[in-house]
Every structure is written in structure tokens, then in C-alpha cells.
Image: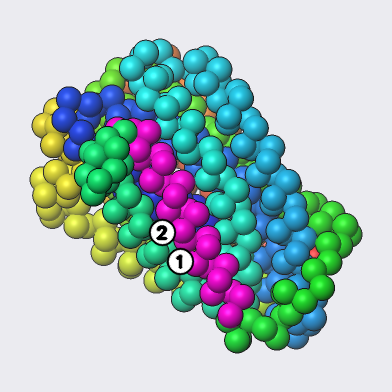
């Protein structure tokens, strides 16, 4: 989830600036909503693979088998690079045709293609970056990751300001500038992060840079463990992409409003991603130490803390709606439409703060197949709701966004049931 959080920081920055391009606000907000979710899907597929490596590293840390961590990290890097090549080819050569099938508005379609054209190059640095993120998360040194996110966020902010509007001696590129800025910020963050890793004295004990060896058996084990998580990602974010595609058919304004809500949704979810990634490591580490009785209390305490932090952020939108919404866009029609969805968003965040922790606690046990079954079942319920309410009945945005409530509630109930059943005690990785 840390990888997803970093990507969303980038998308949030893009949205912030694109909502201020005079005369293009609605078009750009709609396009970044669709293209942003699509690129998030691509990058999260890569992160889902490295998540398997993260779980394996945490398990070895708990078992004090530090000598195996380098091999696991090398396996992550080798497969991630290959996967990045595949994803780049898809976006570069078939991305335009793909969007042409689902986007009806010609202006939004043009902007989506322009954004993806520049953004596709970032997949290499994104995938290799999350390998390092997963290594540090696996060894429980997540503070380092915060610095990486700050570097990426600051560089993206500066480059967006220059490349979208033509400031700081840079060309004025509009939405293409946002995509180029995001790609360059990934390059900058990766170079700095890789350099830090190379000179990190505490990381030298893992011998990451000594005689790199790619173990096919380890890669196979990671693929086996990660396939359910990759399918989960495809199912959850894929269905979300379909949701935005259906919203686009309701109109430009509806899509722009939904992207504003998504912007705050992602912003307020960032702490939850951090907590969820942490609980992956904590649970796997506790199991590695044979402290099985501590697993449930650790998950529950983390869920409560996640809820408190998430709600503290979410309530700012309730108390200061005008200031917060004007922060993203100046379009009054979009702002008034977004206000109607604030309480729906607060309900979603409440359920999400618990659901994501219990679900990722389950994933941390290594029961990724069970996690896949749960997520697929929830996606089916979600998809049925979206198809009927949005696709057929063309209901209001308030009812349309209640699809998230359906998903989160069902995921939370199923995850808690499995964890309380203690069936995860039989899982071996």
C-alpha cells in the first residue's frame, strides 16, 4: 500500500494544478480522474508482486534469517523490471486504442491519451522504486519511506507548476506537462532513494550489492504468493476504473465532481495505507517469532489507531468544505456538486479505516488465496451495485458513491470472520 500511497501523492498534485488551468478545469479534472486511476492500476500491479517479497522479508526477519533477504530482494528486482517492460509496451502501443473504447467525450479522450503518452515512461522507476520500498518495509524501517514520498511530492509540485503553466523557464504543456512532471519526479526520487540505499550503513548487513544472484525458485515462490494479490488489485482497481468510466458517460461535470471526491478520498486514505503496510510486516514478524496470540490484538489496536487518524483528517472537509474544495478547483459548479458527497465520503472513510487493516492483517498471515476470494466476492457485489445504480438507473452521485460502502463493509466482515476462525494458523510460506 505504500507504493499506492506514493502514486496517489503524485496524482493529487497533478489534480491540484490541473484544476486551476483556466477554461480547461472540467476537461482536465475528468481526464486525470480516468487516466490517474488507470496508471494507479498499472503501478499497483507491480507493487502487489513486491508485496509478496515484503512479506517474505518480514518473515525472515522474525526468524532471524537475515542471509536470505538479499536473494529475496534480487528476485523482486529482476521480475519487477521484466514486468515494467510489459506494462510500458501496453501503455505506449495500445493505451490510446484502449481509452478510445471506453471514453465518449472527445476532449477528455484526447487529454487522457496525452497524459498517458508521457506518464508511461515512469513505470520503470515506479516498479524499481517499490522494490526498495518493500525492502525497507520488510525490515521495519518505514521512516525512510516517508522521506522518499516527500522528495517525490516536492519535486512533482515544483515541476507541475513549471510544466503545466509554463513558469520557471519551462514550456507550457497543460495536462502533458503534469504527466511529464510526475514521471520526472519518479526518476528523481528513485535516483536519490537508490543512492541512499547504496550508502546506508544499517542496510549493509543484508549484502544487497554483493554478488547479486537471481534465484528462480525464490521468484517462483514470490509469484505464487503474489498472484492472488495481483488479481485482487486488478479486481478492485479495475472495478473502480469501470466505475469512473460509467460516471464519464453521465457527463463531464459528474466525472469532474467524482474526481474531486476521489482526490480527498485518496488524500485522507494515505495514513491508512501506511498503517496497512505496517500491519503486513507486524503480523508476518509476529508469526515468524511464534507469537501467535499477539496477532489479533496487534491488528485491532492498529485498526483503532487508523480510524482515529483518518477521521481527524476527514473532519477537516466537514468543518471547512469551501476552503478545502477551493484548494482543488475554482469551478463553482463542481464545488457545489462535491459538497453533496461529503457525508458519503466520511462514511466510506470510517469503514475503510477498519476494513483495510483487518484485510491486510489477513494478508500478512500469508493467506493470500483467501484474501483473493474475499476481494473477488466483494468486487462482484460492488460491480453489481455499480452496474445497476450507475449503468442502468443513472442514479445520483450520492447513491453511485455508496458502492464503496457496499465494498468496504463486506470486506471488513469477511476479513474479521477469517481472522477469528484461526484458519490462518495452518498457512505456511
Q: Quadrant of residue 417?
A: bottom right
Q: Which residue is at the front of the view, 143 or 341?
A: 143
What residue is shown at x 23% (from left), y 38% (from top)? 165
Percent coordinates x, y for residue 367 in the rendering: 72, 58
Query: Badge 2, how many Cα within 10 Å: few under 14, some, many 20+?
Result: many
Mark 1: secondary structure: helix
Is residue 377 something one can see in this rendering?
no
Q: Quadrant of residue 334?
A: top left
Q: Which residue is at the front of the view, 248 or 23?
A: 23
Q: Which numbered dot is residue 331?
A: none
Percent coordinates x, y for residue 50 in the rendering: 66, 57
Magenta part of the protein: which range?
A: 174-199
- Does residue 422 lie above or below 269 as drawn? below
What residue is shown at x 41% (from left), y 19% (from top)? 109
The residue pinned by badge 1 equals 148
Percent coordinates x, y for residue 338 in the rendering: 21, 36
Q: Quadrant of the C terminus?
A: bottom right
Mark 2: secondary structure: helix
Q: Main secondary structure of the magenta part?
A: helix
The Cα–Cα distance between marks 2 and 1, rounded to whole angstroms, is: 6 Å
Percent coordinates x, y for residue 125 in the rendering: 56, 52
- Does residue 404 lie above or below 110 as drawn? below
The residue pinned by badge 2 equals 152
Whether the magenta-drawn stretch holds residue 188 is answered as yes
Whether the magenta-drawn stretch holds residue 190 is answered as yes
Query: Badge 1, how many Cα within 10 Å: few under 14, some, many 20+?
Result: many
What residue is shown at x 19% (from left), y 57% (from top)? 316
Amino acid at each position: 500500500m505504500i507504493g499506492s500511497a506514493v502514486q496517489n501523492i503524485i496524482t493529487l498534485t497533478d489534480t491540484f494544478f490541473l484544476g486551476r488551468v483556466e477554461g480547461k478545469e472540467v476537461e482536465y479534472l475528468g481526464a486525470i480522474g480516468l487516466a490517474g486511476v488507470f496508471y494507479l492500476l498499472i503501478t499497483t500491479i507491480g507493487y502487489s508482486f513486491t508485496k509478496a517479497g515484503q512479506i517474505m522479508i518480514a518473515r525472515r526477519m522474525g526468524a532471524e534469517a537475515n542471509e536470505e533477504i538479499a536473494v529475496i530482494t534480487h528476485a523482486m528486482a529482476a521480475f519487477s523490471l521484466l514486468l515494467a517492460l510489459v506494462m510500458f509496451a501496453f501503455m505506449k502501443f495500445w493505451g490510446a486504442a484502449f481509452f478510445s473504447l471506453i471514453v465518449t467525450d472527445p476532449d477528455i479522450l484526447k487529454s487522457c491519451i496525452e497524459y498517458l503518452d508521457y506518464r508511461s515512461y515512469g513505470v520503470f522507476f515506479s516498479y524499481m522504486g517499490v522494490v526498495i520500498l518493500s525492502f525497507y518495509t520488510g525490515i521495519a524501517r518505514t521512516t525512510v519511506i516517508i522521506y522518499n514520498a516527500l522528495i517525490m511530492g516536492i519535486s512533482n509540485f515544483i515541476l507541475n507548476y513549471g510544466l503545466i503553466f509554463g513558469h520557471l523557464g519551462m514550456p507550457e504543456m497543460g495536462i502533458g506537462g503534469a504527466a511529464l512532471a510526475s514521471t520526472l519526479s519518479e526518476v528523481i526520487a528513485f535516483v536519490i532513494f537508490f543512492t541512499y540505499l547504496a550508502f546506508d550503513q544499517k542496510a549493509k548487513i543484508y549484502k544487497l550489492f554483493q554478488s547479486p544472484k537471481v534465484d528462480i525458485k525464490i521468484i517462483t515462490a514470490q509469484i505464487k504468493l503474489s498472484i492472488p494479490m495481483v488479481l485482487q488489485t486488478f479486481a478492485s482497481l479495475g472495478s473502480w476504473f469501470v466505475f469512473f468510466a460509467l460516471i464519464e458517460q453521465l457527463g463531464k461535470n459528474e466525472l469532474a465532481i467524482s474526481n474531486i471526491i476521489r482526490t480527498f478520498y485518496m488524500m485522507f486514505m494515505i495514513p491508512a495505507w501506511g498503517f496497512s503496510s505496517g500491519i503486513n510486516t507486524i503480523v508476518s514478524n509476529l508469526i515468524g517469532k511464534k507469537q501467535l496470540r499477539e496477532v489479533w490484538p496487534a491488528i485491532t489496536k492498529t485498526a483503532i489507531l487508523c480510524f482515529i487518524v483518518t477521521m481527524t483528517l476527514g473532519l477537516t472537509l466537514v468543518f471547512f468544505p469551501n476552503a478545502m474544495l477551493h484548494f482543488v478547483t475554482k469551478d463553482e459548479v463542481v464545488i457545489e456538486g462535491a459538497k453533496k458527497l461529503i457525508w458519503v465520503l466520511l462514511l466510506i472513510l470510517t469503514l475503510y479505516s477498519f476494513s483495510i487493516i483487518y484485510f491486510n492483517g489477513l494478508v500478512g498471515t500469508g493467506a493470500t488465496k483467501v484474501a483473493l476470494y474475499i476481494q473477488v466476492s466483494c468486487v462482484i457485489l460492488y460491480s453489481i451495485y455499480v452496474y445497476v445504480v450507475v449503468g442502468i438507473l443513472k442514479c445520483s452521485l450520492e447513491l453511485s458513491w455508496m458502492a464503496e460502502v457496499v465494498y468496504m463493509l463486506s470486506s471488513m466482515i469477511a476479513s474479521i470472520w477469517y481472522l477469528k476462525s484461526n484458519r490462518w494458523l495452518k498457512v505456511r510460506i
